[in-house]
Image: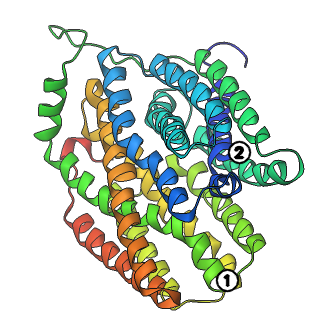
Amino acid sequence: MFKKGGYIYYAMGNGMFYFSWAMFACIISVYLADVGCSATEISLVTSASALFAMATQPICGFLADRFRSPKYVAIISAILAIISGILFAYTKSFVFLFLMNGLTQGFLNGITALSDRLATASPYPFGAIRVWGSILYAIGAQISGYVYDNISPKANYYIFAVGIAVMVFSFIMMNDAKPLAKEGESEKVTTKEVLIALWHNKPFKMFMLIYFLFQGAASAQGIYLPLFIKQLGGTTTIVGTTLLFSTLSELPAVLFSDKLIKKVSYKHLMIFACVMSLIRFVWYSTCPTPNMIMIMFFFQGMTSIIFILVAVRIILDLVEDKYVNTAYGISSMLAKGLAALIFQVICGKIIDIVGGNFGYTITYYIFAATMVVCILLSWRFKMPEKKEN
């Protein structure tokens, strides 16, 4: 059980990674307000994570392919995240808050794809590993608020550092995901070789377009949902409870993802997630009561998480093993970085200009229209016959 490569290290590594991220990021806007940042400064500091992720995710993926070691690239990124995370807690300068938040969450975003790569390369079901990330993220979100109110705001960042240190130990005890080089191939790949291979991979490009649109809308919705609930008259308690239940609703999809993906094609899973997201966004556009939004928390477990789980597997099937880490990095950069940033800025402007409930109604119309496009593209998407799941 405790031997190198044991299940406990994969579960603990994935769980502590997301627990630590929750401790750092869940109440960052509250922390920034308390250190004297204006609303505009808060929006700029929080946007740094998406901006920096656009660089760190593909770089981490490429380095993992270049040196054939996602494990050690992830460990180095984690150590750098600890340093920048602690520095974030000890500055009140807007510039340094922007830089340290961007670096910390940039490194964490870089680790995300590498952590998934290590999990998929293990002898254990991916869902049985990833489920601990969802559980401990939900726990971290609740603990961060309690620690902030009852102990010290800075204490969250110390807990973050300790959590990442535990994750590093777990990663050290995992087996690395090193692809086997084919006869006649060089051990290392060049940037040009990777980019050319991915550019000529038509199914990969088609999926990336769908993932870009879906994740852009989903990420922006996740940012604005707490503000939407507050706009509708909800309390902070309702916001926290909704986020907790939404995270926990992901557990069945994560836990049974291996069985689900074996029985249902990628295409139909993508269409299902898009259709459920469409229903969700159209309903939100009617401005329901905060309590109804909280009660319908299970939408999260049937939308975003399913698409993310598909993305992890489909890229693994579409891309040659030696390019997989770079492909993960590029997908995260485009979908969780660039797309999230574009959708957040556009929707933020709409909410500021229009204002009130109607501003959110227009925003959710945009999200719903995006899902319609994703459904049409998913319907046309085809896996190569020899790689159909």
Give 348 or 59, whichever is nearer the viewer.
348
**The quarter of the displayed image where residue 272 is located:** bottom left
Q: Can the viewer see residue 164? A: yes
Mark 1 belongs to which amino acid? Pro
Q: Whole-percent x and y of residue 311?
A: 38, 49
Identified at 63% across, 86% down, the residue is 232
Identified at 22% across, 50% down, the residue is 383
Mark 2 belongs to which amino acid? Leu
Q: Is residue 270 above or below residue 308?
A: below
Horizontally, residue 97 falls left or right of residue 251, namely: left
**The quarter of the displayed image where residue 319 is located:** top left
- SS for dot 2: helix
Q: Can the viewer see residue 265? A: no
- Neighbor class of circle 1 (other Cα within 10 Å; few <14, some 14-19, many 20+) is many
Pointer 1 and pointer 2: residues touching (CB < 8 Å)?
no
Q: Whole-percent x and y of residue 77?
A: 50, 25
Q: Which residue is mark 1?
A: 290
Give 169 or 317, whichever is nearer the viewer.
169
Identified at 78% across, 71% down, the residue is 237
Residue lying at the far right of the rendered structure: 150
Q: Whole-percent x and y of residue 154?
A: 76, 40
Give 325 or 29, whichever is nearer the viewer.
29
Q: Which residue is mark 2?
A: 136
Horizontally, residue 3 falls left or right of residue 145, namely: left
Q: Is residue 336 above or below residue 118?
A: below
- Neighbor class of circle 2 (other Cα within 10 Å; few <14, some 14-19, many 20+) is many
Circle 1 or circle 2, nearest the eye? 1
**Quadrant of the rendering where the N terminus is positioned:** top right
Identified at 69% across, 52% down, the residue is 31
